[in-house]
Image: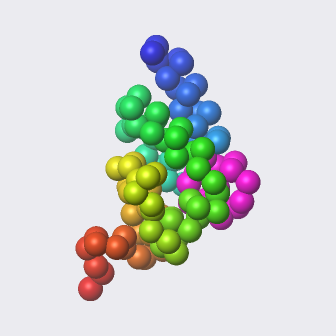
Amino acid sequence: MDHTRHETRRRRLIFRASHRGTHETDLLVGGFVAATIAAMDEAALDDLEAILELPDVDLFDWLTGRRAVPQEVASPLLARMVAWALAQRGMTAPGGPTNG
């Protein structure tokens, strides 16, 4: 993929991530994507597109620690997103390092 198409794809994903429908999920998903997308390769961008297809209510619950991510949708990128979102709130993911 050439540089221009790659950058266009990234800009579209940033927009999609921050315009999901609910303000809270926009902030969590959009914040993670804005902070990490520059380091994502094509495979990670593919994974991100799959994550962006998931329902807002589920993403919000997972990103706030209300519910665990089900195995059928779990991925390394989604785990990073959950850890990032929890860290923004001063929390850690289950099984992760603790504060203190």
Q: Residue furthest bottom?
A: 100
Locate residue 28, reporting x and y percent.
56, 60
* Picture residue at 59% right of the left edge, 61% below the top: 58
Q: Estimate the x, y position of residue 55 in percent, counting from the top left.
A: 63, 54
Q: Which of the image's four quarters has the C terminus? A: bottom left
Say if the magenta span includes residue 93: no
Helix, strand or loop: magenta stretch: helix
Residue 15, visible in the rendered structure: yes
Image quadrant for the N terminus?
top left
Q: Which of the 4 quarters of the picture holds residue 24?
A: bottom right
> Is residue 56 rendered to the left or right of residue 86?
right
Q: Which of 93/55 is in front?
A: 55
What residue is rendered at 58% in x and 45% in y? 52
Would residue 70 appear left or right of 59 to someone viewing this image?
left
Model colouring: rainbow
Q: Does 75 appear above or below 66?
A: above
From where the camera sits, is residue 88 visible?
no
In the rendered image, residue 50, in percent from the top left (x then y), is placed at 52, 41
Report x, y in % for residue 3: 47, 18
Q: Is residue 91 above or below residue 48?
A: below
Q: Find the magenta span and give its range.
A: 17-30
Q: Is residue 19 magenta?
A: yes
Q: How many numbered discs?
A: 0
